[in-house]
Structure formats: structure tokens, C-alpha cells
């Protein structure tokens, strides 16, 4: 790791999703968004279902993170989540289909538990799509 960088590691129970030096990390904690820069004070926070953005040498990259915990200590940022995917791993068409299906199902649910489960699944699909869309915009991809 070089001076002025953070070592970012995104881990799930199945694999190390990402591990490399970065210049900054932006994530949405359950109580708001925060950006981590080198020499940040130690921190542990619960993450919301959303995206994590990280800036390498020349570009921003994105991962969809389905909740979890972020720890910052000694220029190391570790994110542990049950589910995390890099933007390049997300099948946009499949995520769009899931979102459409879940939005339709949500309107048909009446039981509180069913509604909450549908809302969580929809949040996951929307986080995945947000990661893909943000990357497209940053890299000058297709606009909708």
C-alpha cells in the first residue's frame, strides 16, 4: 500500500469480492452516507442495503452491498456482508426482471411479514441496478 491510500477489502462468506488499494471509499451506513479518506479515525458502522463506491488511481468503481458492517482502522477498510457484487458482475437484465417482478408482488401482499420480505428483496434489486447505472454514467455509457 502506498502513502495516501486505503486498503479496501470487501468480504462475503463465500469469497473476497474485492481487495486493492484505493484513494477513497463512500458507503451508506444505516444512519447516513460517509466517505472514508486516508488517515480516517477508527470506525465501525452497520451498512444499509445500497452501493459502495471506491476510487482507484483513475476511476470510480462500485459494488452493491446488501447490508453488513464496515470497519476502518489504520488505513484499512474492511466491509463484511452476506451478499456483495461488483458492478461488473451484475446481470442488468436479470436485476431489472427481479425488480419488476418484486414491484408487482409487493402490491399483492397483505401480510406484514410478506410485505417486509418483498421490500427487502426489492431493495436488493434496486441496489444492484444502482451500481450498474452509476458505473455506466461515470464511464460514459448508455443513458436512459
Image (cartoon, grey):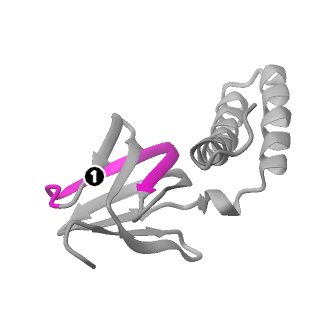
- Does the segment drawn in magenta span residue 48? yes
Residue interval drawn in magenta = 39-54
Position above or below: 62 against 49: below
Q: Secondary structure at mark 1?
A: strand
Residue 125 at x, y = what percent? 70, 43
Q: Residue at x 78, y 55 (%)?
A: 91
Q: Quadrant of the C terminus?
A: top right
Point out residue 126 in the picture as x, y percentages from the top left corner. 66, 38
Quarter residue 113 falls in: top right
Q: Is residue 87 magenta?
A: no
Would you say 58 lies left or right of 84 here? left
Q: Position of residue 3 (x, y in %)?
A: 19, 72
Q: Which image quadrant is residue 76 in?
A: bottom left
At 69% from the left edge and 36% from the top edge, which residue is drawn? 122
Magenta segment's dominant SS is strand
| Residue occupied by mark 1 | 36
- Horizontal side, residue 86 vs residue 95: left or right: left
Amino acid at each position: 500500500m502506498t502513502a495516501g491510500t486505503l486498503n479496501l477489502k470487501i468480504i462475503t462468506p463465500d469469497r473476497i469480492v474485492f481487495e486493492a488499494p484505493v484513494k477513497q471509499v463512500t458507503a451508506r451506513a444505516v444512519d447516513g452516507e460517509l466517505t472514508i479518506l486516508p488517515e480516517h479515525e477508527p470506525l465501525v458502522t452497520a451498512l444499509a442495503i445500497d452501493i459502495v463506491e471506491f476510487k482507484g488511481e483513475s476511476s470510480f468503481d462500485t459494488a452493491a452491498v446488501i447490508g453488513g458492517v464496515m470497519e476502518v482502522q489504520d488505513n484499512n477498510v474492511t466491509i463484511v456482508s452476506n451478499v456483495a457484487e461488483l458492478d461488473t458482475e451484475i446481470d442488468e437484465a436479470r436485476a431489472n426482471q427481479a425488480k419488476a417482478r418484486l414491484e408487482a408482488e409487493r402490491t399483492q401482499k397483505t401480510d406484514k411479514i410478506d410485505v417486509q420480505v418483498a421490500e427487502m428483496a426489492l431493495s436488493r434489486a434496486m441496489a444492484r441496478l444502482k451500481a450498474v447505472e452509476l458505473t455506466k454514467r461515470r464511464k460514459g455509457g448508455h443513458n436512459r
